[in-house]
Amino acid sequence: MKPSDRVDRVPPSGIRRFFELAEEADDVISLGVGEPDFSAPWAAREAGITSLEQGRTSYTANRGRRELRERIQRKLREYDLEYSADDEIIVTTGVSEALDVGIRALVNPGDTVAVPDPSYVSYRPTVEFADAEPLAVPTSMDDEFRLSYETLQEAGAEDADALVMCYPNNPTGAIMPEDDLREVAEFARDHDVTVLSDEVYADLTYDGDHTSIASLEGMRERTVVFNGFSKAYAMTGMRLGYAAAPPEVVSAMNRVHQYTMLSAPTTAQYMAIEALDSCNADVEEMRREFDRRRNFVLARLEEIGLDCFTAKGAFYVFPESPWEDDGEFAEALLEEEGVAVVPGNVFGESGEGHLRMSYATGMEDLKEAMDRLDSFV
Amino acid sequence: MDKLHRDLVDLLSKDARQSTEDLARMTDSTAEEVEEAIDELEEDGVLLGYQAVVDWTEVTDDHVEAYVEVNVALDRETDYTDVSERIQSYPEVQRLTLVSGNYDFGLVIQGDSMNEVSRFVSDKIAVIPEITQTVTHFVMETYKDRGVEFGDGDDDERLSVSP
Ligand SMILES: Cc1ncc(COP(=O)(O)O)c(C=O)c1O
């Protein structure tokens, strides 16, 4: 059988190749991991276990359990966002599904979707699977990988129908403070661009609170906010996320979701209810631990002499590669020193010449990895 | 307490064996600042000591730990501090706390055998005039101590490289 043209035109992820290399090597310390090294808070796990003991293994409402949506409504208020649990929130199988459904619900075949470059590896393929065209918006270390009115304009994004953005950012660790977000908001309003804002790292910021672009004037009606439990609650494997948007958007998303997913995992929904009720302290403890590691890694990179801007969110730093070819460097580092990092080019052209290092790894391993990196460069 | 002092207390209470340089990197400060802050914390009686968490079953078969509940009867001349002073100086006493509830003092006692610990409680603790009752619980198994879980720990099952 022959795969469809739709699938055929999307190349396999560059991450995958690196994963295979890392799996083959011995004694590897990996800074290539895109998920927390913690387990979900015990209270949330316990709630999942209890729900199973009580036999809660059926489907839920398409949009997710009502109690969960109510708690998400409350959670979003932390970011100055007001969405109704009734018809403005949908619970999904991870942010991944929410993005897919959101793009399919809002983007027509042939539409253009602006995607900052570098960015999380799924955006472009998700756009392409919806038969739309991704448009790269280059960002650079000089601008701390932020978007601006100018960068969007230079990339020709005024003709785009939608913009997918992610701050705090994977792979760079960049954040967008309110002033910078205002420029993007202005651009979106001026050119009637729908914003799909992936805020899955919102609670992992280290220098002040997260601002959501949807909270800015005139943005609620043109923004879909995506968030979930994978990162801040260390629940990647539970596959739970959500989207918040005006009713007509959530309704359209639900049309796709109800046929393709039916409902998000039930056990995970019970865990998430508990997580939102009682796990703030766990999240804060993980955040503080990440912050210390971030400080540590940034300090070591400076000592080693790798240029790196001060990443203020997520759990990544994105230093310059000592060699021009980041792919070659990453491979050599893996081969010679057994340290896995992800070459920046897999996140897009503007990622070339950089390395993504994740500090979602225990302190002892981080120290050892930095020592090995030091002796290699 | 300022942020650096507070961070250092947190970090050292989890792992006291980290180098000054690493502590400085983690707290975004200099080694000198860390050195100075730790000196102050020690002088101010905040940091009282640094100890390892030991799984004694890996060291010897002759290590016994017991919790002892102690009840006391006070009078006008004697308060809790007077009694605690008579208990705390014994090296066998690892921990001594005044607690609310059904008894007054909670002790953690360590020794080489159950016999030794029992004798210590009856000969040295129970005989103190103000003490009216002791109840000794020998520890049979330790699962977690000072935040550290015993046993082999879980393997990291994450994919070594992921998006
Ligand atoms: C920016 C970003 N968005 C979405 C996801 C996927 O999230 P989920 O596990 O909720 O599908 C990731 C995971 O790496 C991510 O980094």
Image: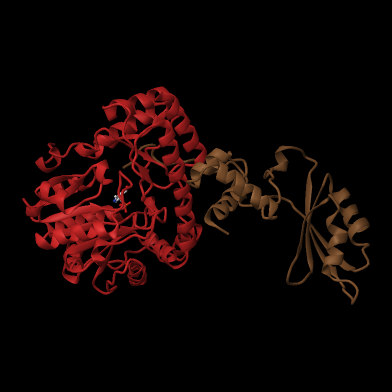
Chain colours: A red, B brown
Say whether residue A289 is visible.
Answer: yes
Tell me: residue B53, above or below residue A107: above
Tell me: residue A64, above or below residue A158: below
Quadrant in the rendering for residue A241? bottom left
The quadrant of the image that shows the C terminus of chain B is: top left
Q: Locate residue A357 relative to residue A130 in the image: left or right.
A: right
Q: Position of residue A2 (x, y in %)?
A: 12, 36
Q: Locate residue A195 relative to residue A53 in the image: left or right.
A: left
Quadrant in the rendering for residue B71? bottom right
Which residue occupies the foreground of this view, A316 or A11? A316
Q: Position of residue A331 (x, y in %)?
A: 33, 26
**Residue in the picture at 44% in, 68% down:** A277
Tell me: residue B59, above or below residue B145: above
Q: Position of residue A76 (x, y in %)?
A: 33, 67
Among all residues in the image, which is located at the extreme top? Answer: A336
**Residue in the picture at 33% in, 34% down:** A19
The quadrant of the image that shows the N terminus of chain B is: bottom right
Q: Position of residue A138 (x, y in %)?
A: 18, 43
Callout count = 0
**Residue in the picture at 34% in, 39% down:** A308
Tell me: residue A247, above or below residue A5: below
Q: Locate residue A250 relative to residue B42 in the image: left or right.
A: left
Which residue occupies the foreground of this view, A304 or A5? A304
Which residue occupies the foreground of this view, A282 or B118? A282
**Residue in the picture at 19% in, 37% down:** A349
Q: Locate residue A161 relative to residue A341 in the image: left or right.
A: left
Say whether residue A92 is visible.
Answer: no
Among all residues in the image, which is located at the extreme bottom? Answer: B76
Which residue occupies the foreground of this view, A247 or A350? A350
